[in-house]
Amino acid sequence: MFITIDRSLFLEMLQTVGQIVPLRPVIASLAGVFIQAENDQVRLTTNDLEQSISVVGEAVVSEPGEVLIPAKILIEAVRRSPAEEVVLKQLPGRSAINFQSGSVHMEILTLPVEEFPELPQFSLQHSYTLPQPLFKDIMRQVSFAISTEELRPVLTGALLSFNKEDVRLTALDGFKLACRWSTYLKSEQEAQAIIPGKAIRNLLKLLGDTEPMEIGIGENFAAFEFSGARLVTRLLEGNFPDIQQFIPEQYQTQIVVGSEELWQAIVRAALVCKNGTADSVKFNIGDGQIAVSAQSMELGRHYETIPIQHKGEDLEIMYNIKSIIEVLRSAQAPEVVIDFHGTYGPCICRPVGQDDYFSLLMPVRLT
């Protein structure tokens, strides 16, 4: 293999596929970038056994071929290259490649190509097209509710649903829940897939163009194609919970409050907590205001009030600071309406003026 490629393009491609390169790979080949070159195109691929990312770019291919190069050293070599072009030339009869950029010459040892694992062959039964910004926004509002605990593997992903009414993404972890939907796409091809949280987080980093993206759903895999890149992920197996069972019908207390005002008050309250956002904050609702308070033996106490619109009963309730901040930030709105269902029931948070999203959070017990 002998290629010449624009340094900026090459670095962008490497940073895309480098998202899933494991820090401590279970097999050595997973630490590599698989490079295939032919017909003046270069394809880069990485794989962590659960998902794969590939991206295609233009290059001058003097000699076609393929090579597996350790990702870490290649990315850093390209990042620190002084010239506008990078030349890679495979050394005949040796497990090494010559790297050249301007006056820089490096010899990088390569990994055995035959040891690079490929995902099993699969077919996609359903295909959908969405704008990248829309799907990124949907994921951003829901991803905080994806569980990081492996006790219930199905909850470490988000349920992606396509149906005749909308496209919908749902996540829950036993304490919080988030659901966002859009009527942009109404499909006669109904499908559901549980997308792993790791894939959701990678897509949030990678999506950004205004161009549309393609989403393909198969029996065990899903594929996301965007901006010349393709991310393929295994799907999580299991039955995703029906979220309707967790949503109360009638609130006991309802408030409308500025989300930034409440969020900043909670952040200030966390200053007096020994464990910061891992601790709890108390709300006292009544008389047209919400009182935000917290205290600890080690650091002191905090108390402040915020004006609100208030319906229903007065209420005293406590929440984990980190979780309530995530709920408010994910609403992405100047004001939120929050329905409370008693001291020990869930609260439902919705952005004012947005009827396609809600989140749910369970309180902690009063102390």
Image (cartoon, rainbow, N blue to C red):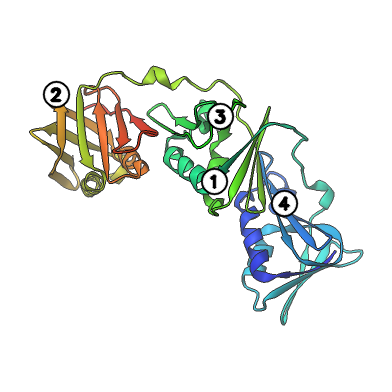
Q: Earlier in the sequence, mark 2 or mark 1?
A: 1
The CA span between labels 2 and 3 is 39 Å
Q: Position of residue 81 (x, y in %)?
A: 65, 74
Q: Nearer the viewer, mark 4 or mark 2?
A: 2
**Quadrant housing residue 162:** top right
Q: Which residue lies under the disc numbered 2?
A: 313
Quarter of the image for the C terminus: give it. top left
The CA span between labels 4 and 1 is 24 Å
The residue drawn where x is 67% and y is 47% is 230
Residue placed most toward the observer, 263 or 129: 129
Q: Earlier in the sequence, mark 4 or mark 1?
A: 4
Label 1: element kind: strand
The residue drawn where x is 73% and y is 69% is 5
The CA span between labels 3 and 1 is 15 Å
Label 2: element kind: loop
Q: Which residue lies under the disc numbered 3?
A: 162
Quarter of the image for the N terminus: give it. bottom right
Up-down: is 355 above or below 131?
above
Q: Position of residue 173 (x, y in %)?
A: 44, 29
Q: Amino acid at mark 2?
A: Glu
Q: Amino acid at mark 1?
A: Pro
Q: Amino acid at mark 3?
A: Phe
Mark sitting on residue 45? 4
Label 3: element kind: strand
Q: Amino acid at mark 4?
A: Thr
Q: Which residue lies under the disc numbered 1?
A: 131
Locate residue 306 relative to residue 151 in the image: left or right.
Answer: left
